[in-house]
Image (cartoon, rainbow, N blue to C red):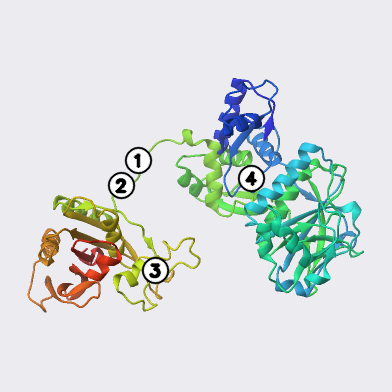
Amino acid sequence: MAKPIPGPRAQEEFEELCFSFGIELDDVTTEKAIIRKEKHLEEEAMDDEEVIYKIEVPANRYDLLCLEGLVQSLCVFSGVDQIPVYSMAKISQESMLKMHVKPETSRIRPFVVCAVLRGITFDEARYNSFIDLQDRLHQNICRRRTLVAIGTHDLDTLEGPFTYEALSPSDINFVPLKQVKSFRADELMEFYKSDMKLKKFLHIIEHSPVFPVLYDRNRTVLSLPPIINGAHSAITLKTKNVFIECTATDLTKAKIVLNTMVTMFSVYCEQKFEVEPVEVIESNGESNIYPVLSSYSMKVPLSYINGIVGASLEANKVADLLNKMQLHAKQSGLADDSCYMNVYVPPNRSDVLHPCDVAEDVAIAYGYNEIPKRKPQSLKPLPLSQFGDLLRMEIAMAGYTEVLTWILCSYKENFPMLKRKDDKSTAVTIGNPRSSDFEVVRTSLMAGMLKTIGHNKDHPKPIKIFEVGDIAVLDKSNDVGARNHRQLAALYCGSNSGFEQIHGLVDRIMEITGTPFVLSGDNSGYYIEESDKPEFLSKRQASIIYKGKHIGVFGVVDIEVLGNFGIPDPCSFVELNVEDLL
């Protein structure tokens, strides 16, 4: 957002307004200042430099991604403007432009929604903002055009009805935007592999046997989504009627994107805030009219809003606050516990999905600094967390240092490096890991602790470390398919490390939890029995049995395992389930 350089007071007032509205003025600079900083130049700033406001907005407020939406929201918030009322042009369904969807589009990009902005007036700043909003939406809700791709066209260069088809690449031929030569669609894929901006979108369709394409009545190509528009219908500063089409794999997001585009720029139309609808006729004959600009209503109890905000507000006050946030609101019901607010959400506020979103807007409009301070009803920690803290303190007093390791690890560290076999029914696997270091959720604390020792093997010995943390294992009975366990692990590394050192720590842990040592088979306390885990030396390991249940294992770590983690010194290790002790 660029404006003439303001005075210090004006900038301070604008920063306060942004803060009150819930957005942040990140920086105030100029293009030349940015260049000077990058090149380490010490030239003085000129008086005629245009200042740039860098404003950080919430990721789900798509209406704030352009100057028009930001200005409109701030003007309504500060009481300068009324809430805009968006409407559909009053034309008969027979007079509407038609978009016919062919059945082949279901193979690649099945949805399309459309709208028309009539009598729009562009200047250079408005045109640039129009293009910038498309780019920001493509990067945000459109997920780099994989979910939605926006096409905007000069309607006066086209003739309806339109068709949305999916054809073989060799059957599509047109002149793309900013080019003078005609290309086949398959040739275009090769051509744009050297284009720094467009090459990152080619993967979306390039391996498909059919490409999506939009035609008008004369078989003029509007666009090849999600790659490029046709040059024939390119928008210019002289464009008066804009045809907007959004092709998508997600219909809900396509509707949001279309609503955002038309609500932000219908302000420049001859009939302010009016949008002309387009009828989309699906391949099965079903007809839908877009955009959907009607407000949807939501009933929110006044007591719920006050409970979330933490203030006692009257219904009339809440209605006024919501109006500042562009949400129409009226009181309904009696002025007691049964009172609730009828909230009408406009098409440009797609972020309002739940009553908690309404309560958040009330809190923003009321002012977070105005909410009275109060003590939380309870500061008592969860029993498991409280028990874990007590264990941490006791083990630390035994001379061990606490470490915190990643809950994600590589598959290799979790299984082969510990000589464990993957039974495919234990570990939670990451579907699309960004790094080979984070492929699975750890099923044990052991790998992280051995890795810590491996990175600190030159540290003076002995090294005594411990961790209290969560692991995750698959569980089909759980609604999320997995469950967490709180584990305690400790490791002793040094030349004299042996079974007895770690055994002593096990006995201390059981002593401080009030668990007596008993004979094998007695379920009134704990006892140990021989185990056979591959990560430990044979005959130098034991299982911990607590009240008849296996809760952990300890012993001397196997030499091969130590070598896998680059550890030259012997180590003894214990790991047990804290929840079972609790």
* Secondary element at image label 3: helix
In which quadrant of the rendered image does the C terminus lie? Answer: bottom left
In three-dimensional space, the C-alpha distance between marks 4 and 3, rounded to whole angstroms, equals 49 Å
Horizontal arrangement in the rendering, residue 507 relative to residue 57 (left or right):
left
CB atoms of marks 2 and 3 within 8 Å: no
Image location (x, y in percent) of residue 34? 61, 32
First along the sequence among labels 1 and 3: 1
Tag 4 residue = 327
The residue identified by callout 1 is 375
- Alpha-carbon span between mark 2 and mark 3: 39 Å
Of the pair 497 and 290, the residue shown nearer to us: 497
Judged by depth in the image, the label closer to the viewer, 2 or 3, is 3
> Circle 2 is placed at which residue position?
379
Tell me which label, 1 or 4, sits earlier in the chain: 4
Q: Secondary structure at mark 4?
A: loop
- What residue type is disc 1 on? Lys
In percent of width and height, residue 431 lies at 49, 68
Quadrant of res 176: bottom right
Specify few, some or many for label 3: CA neighbours under 10 Å numbering under 14, 14-19, or 20 or more. Answer: many
Residue sitting at x 19%, y 54%: 463
Q: What x and y, as percent, mark residue 167?
A: 79, 72
State the separation of the CA atoms marked 4 and 2. Answer: 35 Å
Whether residues under marks 2 and 1 lie with C-beta atoms below 8 angstroms apart, the answer is: yes
Judging depth in this view, the residue of 179 and 326 nearest the camera is 179
Q: Counting residues from the N terminus, which is met first, the one under dot 4 or under dot 2? A: 4
| Mark 1 crowd level (few <14, some 14–19, many ≥20, 10 Å Cα) | few
Q: Is residue 507 left or right of residue 475?
A: left
Q: Reply above or below: 355 against 93.
A: above
Q: Amino acid at mark 2?
A: Leu
Q: Secondary structure at mark 2?
A: loop
The reply to whether the C-beta atoms of the residues labelled 1 and 3 are less than 8 Å apart is no
